[in-house]
Image (cartoon, coloured by chain):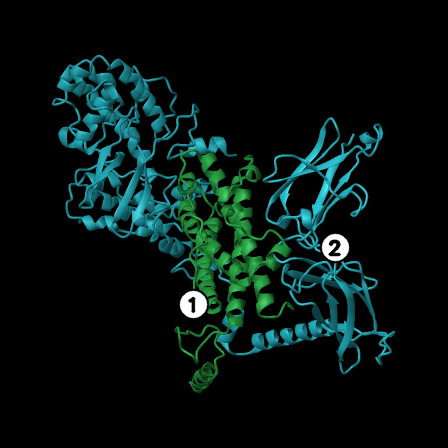
Chain colours: A green, B cyan
Amino acid sequence: GLLLVVLLVSNMLLTKEGVTSFPICSNGSVNCQLSLRELFDRVVKLSHLVHFLSSEIFNEFNEHYGQGRHFIARAVNSCHTSTLTTPEDKEQAQQIHHEDLLNLVLGMLRSWNDPLIHLASEVQRIKEAPDTILRKAVEIEEKNKRLLEGMEKIVGRINSGEVGNEIYSQWEGLPSLQLADEDSRLSAFYNLLHCFHRDSHKIDNYLKLLKCRLIHGSNC
Amino acid sequence: LQWPQISKCRSPELETFSCYWTDGNVYNLTAPGTIRLLYMKRNDEDWKECPDYITAGENSCYFNTSYTSIWIPYCVKLANKDEVFDEKCFSVDEIVLPDPPVHLNWTLLNTSQTGIHGDIQVRWDPPPTADVQKGWITLEYELQYKEVNETKWKELEPRLSTMVPLYSLKMGRDYEIRVRSRQRTSEKFGEFSEILYVSFSQAGIEFVHCAEEIEFPWFLVVIFGACGLAVTLILILLSKQPRLKMLIFPPVPVPKIKGIDPDLLKKGKLDEVNSILASHDNYKTQLCNDDLWVEFIELDIEDPDEKNRASDTDRLLSEDHLKSHSCLAAKDDDSGRASCCEPDIPETDFSASDTCDAISDIDQFKKVTEKEDLLCLDRKHNDESLPGLANTDIQELHMNTQSENSQPWPPFADCVDSASPSVHTQLSNQNSLTNTDFYAQVSDITPAGSVVLSPGQKSKVGRAQFDGCTEQNFTMDNAYFCEADVKKCIAVTSHEEDELHVQEQSCNEDAYFTTESLTTTIVNLGASTAETPSSEMPVPDYTSIHIVHSPQGLVLNATALPVPDKEFNMSCGYVSTDQLNKIMP
């Protein structure tokens, strides 16, 4: 009993000092504010996790459904985000202004919000989809949402309140996920997962680049 | 026969990439140098040639930063003028394999008090090609170490940081350390770094050189543990605490039957044991062995009391209604023993009383003999009585059949046991069958608990004298006729009666035997096509006790004995002494 009381008291004291991981800050309040550093830390962790999950789900999908099927992703790989101009190598990424890059990342995340929701729901209709794939699809969608929120906060912070909505790519691939022919449907899933795997790597890279540039002064 | 092949394409830092191929032994025939590597980016229309064949070494193609685009699919193919040898497609972010880390070094953190063990910290730098500082690529590292003379490397978990402590290294030994790296979301590691040698003596560190190392004295622990455990167990055994003893050493259950004292078994008091066992359902002793037969027969002869007792038949025939139904509940300890010897419970209308008489007789009998056995009626009576029965019955039968003047009956009726009490009641003129015993079987048990008996069918007497019966040599001193023989007789007659069953039916009222079961058996036997389907089997003579529902009653099981073609039928209930003597020396 006494030990419990001691623990509670110590917890309260520690909380007061702001040691908790996720303080809830309301907009405009001065005292309670996540520093940009912390925001970036969280966002980079999330983007890394999302990319990691996308690798896993892509590999599992290949293992499960790719046997005997030749998913020709390279040739058919027309991701819906290819319309967005993104830096293709390090120089380009370094040259682009960080605000533009942030907006670009935000736009990409927004563009993926819709497809990920539909992925989570449509993948359940695949015949004998393993549980791991179903769970990961749901988790990816959740984490991506949180990543989007975090990005919006960062962009709001850095761009001083302006959040541009111009960068966006509409996803029209839902009918392809609902095709009657199973082979075509699985190919559509493969493409979607491959595109997301690539885009999540892009997002992760850009954010790490930005974090090092903005927070650590290019000295990670 | 091996064609040229693209062995791998690799990007060390996500900024450039190179592809390597093998010649293959076929190609030595044609002129070398005509192999070309062509590549095509996703949006290109044409295959382009490799920009740099030199930088990456022989049989390689190097794409510098200007030619490298990340996240864009490439296809490369190995070809000469005429044919394509190999083709590969990929995107650069998928083929990242970083260079090994550089500048490995170690520092001593601290040493143990004994000076035998020490902790060190290993540091290294990321590969120079990878731009980790700007965050373009994120690497994680894996360290491996081992003693110099060992063969197997110990691995640590991959981690992001470029320094790692190693704890508890033996100061007297030398170690080797190596590190490798990979892109954080990939699975494949790059090459290992150069090996770092850790030698404490060279560092000039003071340490104690122990020739023998102190290791945990497992051996002593085991010895002392075993001794302690043994001492504890002995103490528990010797202690007077029964509960503790039961807990540690639970008693092994000995075979035990509820209600039976094992001492009874030891002393050989089988009576009591059987009485208790009989109270259990489904208990049946297996008592059919030769010894039993012998004993039974011997006792039967020797016992003087038996000769003087009134015939069971007498009592059965006397119309004594006084016995209550509950008499059936007598002596459960009789049960179960008569599997071989089937009790002949006389047929009677006063079923309860008569059976009680029978049973009580058996009790007396049993008391005299130490052995169990049982419900078998006294054979001596039968010995005496049956011949008498034969004589009288034959006369009766003849008389009756003549009186009826119905053709089908005589041969058939002859084979039926005429000594049923109902017969007796019918034939009031008849001599008292005082010394005759007869046999009946229990055909049913009424819900009230009384036993319904039906007559045994065949006359055991004088069958040999009748026509239509199969020839069987009976020794007349064989007091009991085997049911087998009787069955044959019936079977023979039944054939003859097939056509005459209608007439038989009409004769039923005038039938010699009025008991219901008797007529039905007759009908059954005679008419193979009777309305009521009957079992072909004649009603057996002997009934064995099957189950004793103590103390309420008996369940009797009619046994149909097999018919071996022998003069001496072991399957019969009883064996005469003569037959027995023939068999046994």
- The answer to which quarter of the image holds residue A146 is bottom left
Identify the residue at horizontal 52%, vertical 79% (top origin). B240
Q: Give me the C-alpha separation between circle 1 and circle 2.
A: 47 Å
Q: Which quadrant is the N terminus of chain B positioned in? A: top right
User: What label sits on residue B81 in the rendered view?
Assistant: none
Chain of the residue displaying label 1: A
Residue type highlighted by circle 1? Gly
Q: In the depicted view, which residue is nearer to us: A206 or B415?
A: A206
Residue A156 appearing in the image: yes
| Residue B440 position in % (x across, y down) | 26, 35
Whole-percent x and y of residue B222? 69, 71
The x and y percentages for residue B207 are 84, 79
Crowding around mark 2 (Cα neighbors within 10 Å: few <14, some 14 to 19, many 20+) is some
Residues indicated by labels 1 and 2 sit on the same polypeptide chain: no
Q: Is residue A146 above or below residue B93?
A: below
Say what secondary structure mark 2 lies in.
loop
Q: Is residue B394 toward the left or the right of residue A23 in the image? A: left
Whether residue B437 is visible here, answered yes or no, is: no
Q: Is residue A215 above or below residue B141?
A: below
Report how many numbered discs are placed on residues in the image.
Answer: 2
Crowding near pointer 1: few (<14 within 10 Å), some, many (20+)? few
Relative depth, front residue between A68 and A195: A195
Q: Residue at x 87, y 78 (%)?
A: B204
Q: Is residue B307 above or below residue B409?
A: below
Residue at x-position 78% and y-position 71%: B106
Q: Where is residue B519 drawn, in percent x and y? A: 19, 26
Q: Which residue is mark 1?
A: A161
**Local SS, label 1:** loop
Q: Which chain hosts label 2? A: B
Q: Identify residue for label 2.
A: B191
